[in-house]
Amino acid sequence: MFKPTTAPQDSLTLQLVPILTQACEILREEYQQYCAGGTFDIEKKLDNSPVTQADYRVNTFLTSALTKISDLPLLSEEGDHLTRQNWQKFWMLDPLDGTKEFLHKRPEFTINLSVIDGENTSFAILAIPCEYTLYIAPETGLPLKYDVINQQWFIYAHSEQEEVVKIGLSQSSQNKPQYSEYLEAIAQLSSYSVFKAGSAYKFCMMLEDKVDIYPRFHPTCEWDTSAGQCLLERIGGGLVDFKARTFLYNQRETFLNGGFIAYRNKHMKNLAFQALELMASKH
């Protein structure tokens, strides 16, 4: 949850808020155009995933805007990845995370922007264009939330733990048996409810106390998880692989991530891994 606070003083946050606000505006325009049924360019990538004119337009805008405030190189899902392994510090961007959500006319897509320093994420923003909201992990301290319409700042505040464990799942999870197996294992440990949403939106909902554990058994890429992981780590949660190792960035040949568990706090981490053990014991 979040409580009202005064505007932050760090220059990076203050520089990026108007830039991300404008990027959200561009994405909302594109979404409205798509939902209205006008002509809309959609292509297929080599991995058969969709990419749209909205992805490209936001990518072009942010690529240009970021070069004006910083000389850091940019690694974007829609950009060139050839020299990135020589980079020590850089921007990581997914200009439209949740393209499938967008195309299904579900407003759960996000813009993911982070700064990778070495192998870790040092700064992060997750923007939800359709909710006019930015979630920010500044270079130090607790996550902030910015309400664009009311120009109001909030800071993260820890809340009481509820008895029902809230599990976050992707919209596509019903097609994959591991998720129903995981829920069966959780049911042996606790009462639970399920919150379904696409993209990095689920990480934002973890900050809003709507999700406690987010298990992922099908692939993501580094730009899908970097910002969300940074935000969770700031509140005492995290994102780890199934051997409880924290995700590191720009250390491998591939951008593809293996499965992971994202959790809101240490208690939820323990519960999440107990469920994994119960799953494993059945195979």
Image: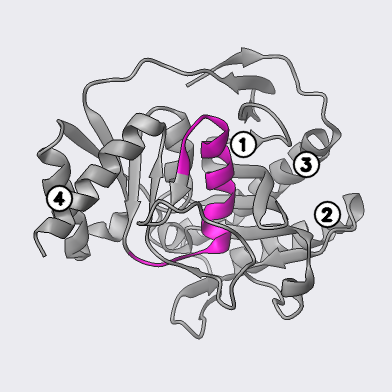
Residue 136, compared with residue 4, is above or below; it is below
Marks 1 and 2, Cα distance to the nearest angstrom?
Answer: 17 Å
Looking at the rendered structure, the kind of residue marked 4 is Leu
- From the top left corner, tell me how far across and down residue 166 is, in percent: 27, 34
**Neighbour tally class for label 3: few under 14, some 14-19, many 20 plus, Cα within 10 Å:** some
- From the top left corner, tell me how far across and down residue 14 is, in percent: 81, 33
Q: Label 1, on which residue?
A: 134
Q: Label 3, on which residue?
A: 16
Please state the extent of the stretch shown in magenta in the rendering: 218-238
Q: Label 4, on which residue?
A: 278
Q: Quadrant of residue 84?
A: bottom right
Marks 4 and 2, Cα distance to the nearest angstrom?
Answer: 48 Å
Looking at the rendered structure, the kind of residue marked 2 is Ala
Looking at the rendered structure, the kind of residue marked 1 is Leu
Q: Secondary structure at mark 2?
A: helix
Q: Secondary structure at mark 1?
A: strand
Q: If you read the primary sequence from the N terminus, does the residue marked by circle 3 or circle 2 appear first?
A: 3
Looking at the rendered structure, the kind of residue marked 3 is Leu
